[in-house]
Amino acid sequence: MQRKWNRSTFGPSSTIYTTVATTLMIAVFVLGYLAIALEHPIKIDKAASALFTGMVIWVILVFTSHGGHPPGCTHPPSL
């Protein structure tokens, strides 16, 4: 018997978890954008700010994505 994975399979807690991760990524993006805009007063090159911001956002995404599987899943669903 094959189980179908959909949004309701994850339960309400994963929706909250995803919302927190998304909010955190948006906050990091805004801070990075401000660092780029305020390049001269803070004396940090905009390339360094952009690379650091992108790296932090990717790290948040990787550690909060569960590899595309539900949080409690120990193996991928069979095709």
Image (spheres, rainbow, N blue to C red):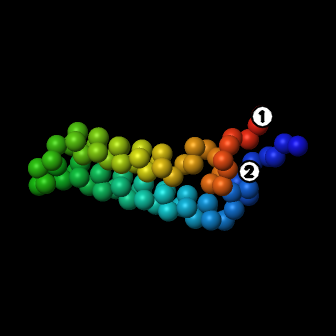
**Residue identifier under label 2:** 6
- The residue shown at (49%, 56%) is 22
Q: Nearer the viewer's eye, disc 1 or disc 2?
A: 1
Image position of 68 with respect to 21: above or below: above
Kindly identify which residue carries mark 1: 79
Q: Residues within 10 Å of mark 2 (few under 14, many from 20)?
A: few
70 relative position to 17: left or right = right
Residue drawn where x is 66% and y is 47% of the image: 74
Q: Nearer the viewer, residue 76 or 23?
A: 76
* Kind of residue at disc 2: Asn
Residue 17, image x and y in percent?
55, 61
Q: Residue furthest front?
A: 74
Q: Position of residue 61 (x, y in %)?
A: 47, 48
Judged left or right of residue 74, residue 24 is: left
> Which quarter shows the N terminus?
top right
Q: Quadrant of the C terminus?
A: top right
Amino acid residing under circle 1? Leu
Q: Position of residue 71 (x, y in %)?
A: 62, 54
Measuring from the top left, give residue 23's x and y in whole percent. Answer: 46, 60
Measured along the vertical axis of the image, is residue 1 above or below residue 13? above
Q: Which residue is drawn at 67% across and 50% down?
A: 73
Task: In this rendered view, identify the residue nearer to me: 17 or 47.
Answer: 17
SS assignment at label 1: loop
Q: Which residue is outermost to the top?
A: 79
Which residue, as the protein is rendered here, is positioned at the far right? 1
The number of callouts visible is: 2
Disc 1/disc 2 C-alpha distance (Å): 14 Å
Residue at 76% from the left image edge and 37% from the top image edge: 78
**Of pointers 1 and 2, the one earlier in the residue sequence:** 2
